[in-house]
Image (cartoon, coloured by chain):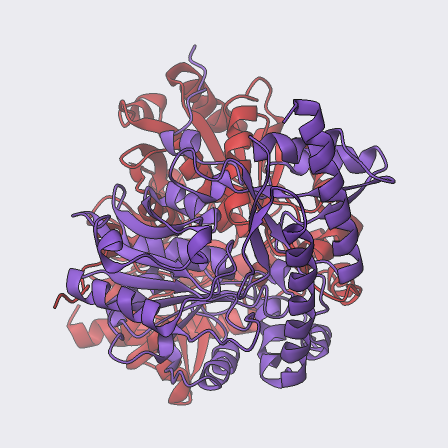
Chain colours: A purple, B red
Amino acid sequence: MNQPTRLSQRAATMPASPIRRLAPYAVAARKRGLEVHGLNIGQPDIPTPQVILDRFRQYTAPYVPYGPSQGLPEYIEALRTYYAGFGARLAPEDIFVTTAGSEAIQFTLGALCDPGDQVIVFEPFYTNYNGFAAMTGVECVPVTTRGEDGYHLPERAAIEAKIGPRTRAILICSPNNPTGTVYTDAEIERLAAICRDRGLYLVSDEVYREFTYDGRTSRSLLTFDGLDDLAIVVDSVSKRYSLCGARIGNIVSKNRPFMDAIMRFGQARLCPPTLEQFACTALTEVPASYTSGVLAEYQKRRDVVFGALSRMPGVRVRKPEGAFYICTGLPVDDANAFAIYLLTEYSQGGETVMVAPLDGFYATPGLGRDEVRLAYVLECGKLERAMDILAGALTAYRARVGA
Amino acid sequence: MNQPTRLSQRAATMPASPIRRLAPYAVAARKRGLEVHGLNIGQPDIPTPQVILDRFRQYTAPYVPYGPSQGLPEYIEALRTYYAGFGARLAPEDIFVTTAGSEAIQFTLGALCDPGDQVIVFEPFYTNYNGFAAMTGVECVPVTTRGEDGYHLPERAAIEAKIGPRTRAILICSPNNPTGTVYTDAEIERLAAICRDRGLYLVSDEVYREFTYDGRTSRSLLTFDGLDDLAIVVDSVSKRYSLCGARIGNIVSKNRPFMDAIMRFGQARLCPPTLEQFACTALTEVPASYTSGVLAEYQKRRDVVFGALSRMPGVRVRKPEGAFYICTGLPVDDANAFAIYLLTEYSQGGETVMVAPLDGFYATPGLGRDEVRLAYVLECGKLERAMDILAGALTAYRARVGA
C-alpha cells in the first residue's frame, strides 16, 4: 500500500507569504487580549466611496449569474472612462477584467512565460510576485535597488546584465510596493528602450497609480507612445477604492495576440465576481474630492511614520514618494525574529505591532534580513502609538539580545 | 528592433472554451434580433435562496477588506455545518475557501502535479479541466466512458492501463458534468482501491452533489472510511444556490501537507471575495424545501429534454441520473459546424438555440465530433420550444448537407 504523500515540487517551493505567515502569532496575541496594530498588510481603513457601496445594494436580480469571461460590458465601459481621464484611449477589447490584480499578474506571467522562463524584477519587490511565479514555474530574476538611491532604477547596463535567453519580460510596480518609489518618465523610457531592443514585454503594475505625494504624479505606461505591442498594465480597484476584498482587477494591453491568450486563460475560470463588477460600475461617479481627500490623509500618515522612524536610533529610512508603504532598516540582526518577538513577547499597555519582514521581498539570498515593510494604513493617532511601541520594542529587544 | 510577438507555449496550447468560444456568434445573432436559447452553459435560472440575497444587503461595513486566505471563519463554520448534514465531520483546517470551483481545481492540480505530470480523467469530462491543466502544465490522460454504459466507469484493468510513472491523481466529477452520470459506491470504492494501491490522490469534484434524480443520492467521497490521506473534494456554491457569478468554492481534505500547500498557494492570491462569503454564511438557513424544490424542477426539465431528444430521428441519448446536463449524439458529421449553423443561419419564428459541441470535452482526438452537451437550465416551456427548434434545425441542416 502506497501513501500518496508526495506533493509537487511546485508545492514544495511555493513560499509562504511574508505578509501573512506571521498571522498565527497575531491570532494568538489577540487571544491573549493584546491589541495588535496591523502594519503588515496593505489593508486600507479608508471608507469605500459611497456611490460604490450604494450600488452594491441596488443589485436586485434574483440570482447571481456568470458574466462574460472578459468582464461585464458596463464595467469595461466604466474602466474606459476612468482611463480616458488621464489620457489613455482604450478600445473595449484592450481591457480584460480579472479576479483582482493577483489573477491579472498570474495570467500575464502564464501568457508570456513557460516553466523555466524568466522575468526581470526590481528588488525589493511585491513578494506575491514570487508566489505567482512559483505557481506558473517562472523565475523572478532580481535587479537590486537600494535605499541610498531612493530605490530608483540603476543604469541600463546593470539591468541588461540580467537579461538572458529565457528572459521574457520586465515587471515593474510604480508607485512601488514595498518601497514607495515613483519611477520618473526617464526611468520608464529607459526600460521601454531595453524592452524594444531586446524583444521583451514591459509589464507595469499600477494599482497604486493615484497614491503619489508632495505634488508628484505617476504617469501610466499606457500614455507613452509607440509601446502598444509591448506594454501590459496590471490594475485593480483594491487600494484605489478600499475594495481589497472585492477581488476586481484588470489587464490592459493593445497587443492582440496577448489579449487573445488572456481570453483563453480567462474562459477556463469562467468569469470574475459579478456583483462586485456591478458595484464598481459606479467608479465613474466617484467625486475627485474622494481621491484628493484620501491622498491628503495618506500623506499625513506617511509624515507621521517617516518622522517617527527618522528619530529612532539606528533606523535607516527614506521618505516614500507614493503608495502607502515604507521600507526601513532596523538595528537588529534578524527582522523575522524581531517581528515574532513583537507578537509573542513584547507589549506596551496591552498593545503591540505587526510588521512584514522584508527578506521575503528580495530574491537575492541574504538581502533584507534586517529590514521590514510597514503599511501606513491606520489613522495618524494609531500610527503614532504604533511608532512608540516599535521604538520601545527595539530598545527592549536590543537590550535582551545584547546588541 | 525586436517585436516581442512570441507568447508562451502555454498560451499557444491553452484551449478556447468549447462552452464559450461560440459566444461571439450568439452576440451577433442577438444583434440581428434573434432570441437565443442558451443551452451551452450551466447557468441556472433558479432564484438564489432569499436568505442569501438578504444577507448581501446586510453588509454594512464602510469598506470591503481582505479576509483570511483560507476564508472567513464564519463561512468555514457554515460549511462545516453543511458537510455535517450528510455525515462528513470536518475540522476548520480541513476546509479552504477558494475563488469558485475553478480555483479549487487549479490549486489542487498545482499542489499535486509538476509540469509534465498526469491526471487520469474520465472522458467526456468537464472541458475546463483542460484549461486548468494547460495553465499548470499538467496532462489530462483520458479513460473513455461510453453512452452505451450510461457513462459509468470501466473495469479496474482499463483504468490501471492508463497509469504511468508520472500519474499523480485520478480526477472525477459526480454527479457528472457533462454526462449526468452518478457514480455508485462500488465505482468510488474501485477508484479508491486503485489510488491506495498505486499511491495516487483521488480528487472528487462534487459541485452537483444535490442534483440527483429518480430517488438516487450521490455519496460524497468525504463519507468513505480510510481515505483521509488521499481524498480531496472540490466544491462550490455556484450551482447549488444559483450563485455562479459569486465565485465562491472550496477545497476539503484531511491531508495536512496538501492543505498546507494549498494555504501557501492561497496566500499568494490573498483571499477569495469577502462580500460573497459573508452572504454565503446564510447557507445554514436555506430551508430543505429550497433544495427539494430545485430538484423537482430539474427532474421535470430533464424529462422534457430527454423525451424530446428520444423522439428525434437519429439522435442517440441516455437518461441522465444527475447534474443538469445531457450528452447527445446527433445525426451530423460535425457538431461544431451544426452549432455555428444554429447561430448564423437557422431560426424559427425569430428564435434559435446555442449548444456546446462535445469534442472539447474529450481528450482523445476524434471523439465527440457528432455530439453536443445541452444544459437544461431553462424553464420547461422554453426547453420544449428549444427542442422544437433543435429538431427543425437538424432536419434543415441534414437536407442542406445532403445527409
- Residue at the outermost left position: B1
Q: Quadrant of residue A228?
A: bottom left
| Quadrant in the rendering for residue A394 | top right
Quarter occupied by residue A336: top right
Residue B266 visible? The answer is yes
Q: Is residue B56 left or right of residue B129?
A: right
B306 or B155: nearer the eye? B155
Q: On the rendered image, what quadrant is the N terminus of chain B found in?
A: bottom left
Q: Nearer the viewer, residue A17 or B80?
A: A17
**Is residue A99 shown to the viewer in this render?**
no
Image height of A61 relative to A388, above or below: below
User: Percent x, y for residue B400?
Assistant: 19, 77
Give left or right: position of B211 versus B349. Answer: right
Count of marks placed on residues: 0
Residue sitting at x 63%, y 64%: A243
Residue at point 51%, 29% (across, down) = B258
Instruction: Where is residue A182? Give x, y as percent.
Output: 46, 66
Image quadrant for the C terminus of chain B?
bottom left
Q: Residue at x 86, y 37 (%)?
A: A33
* Residue A90 position (above or below residue B231): below
Q: Position of residue A295 (x, y in %)?
A: 63, 73
Question: Which residue is more in the foreground, A63 or A186?
Answer: A186
**Residue B120 locus on image (x, y percent):** 34, 33
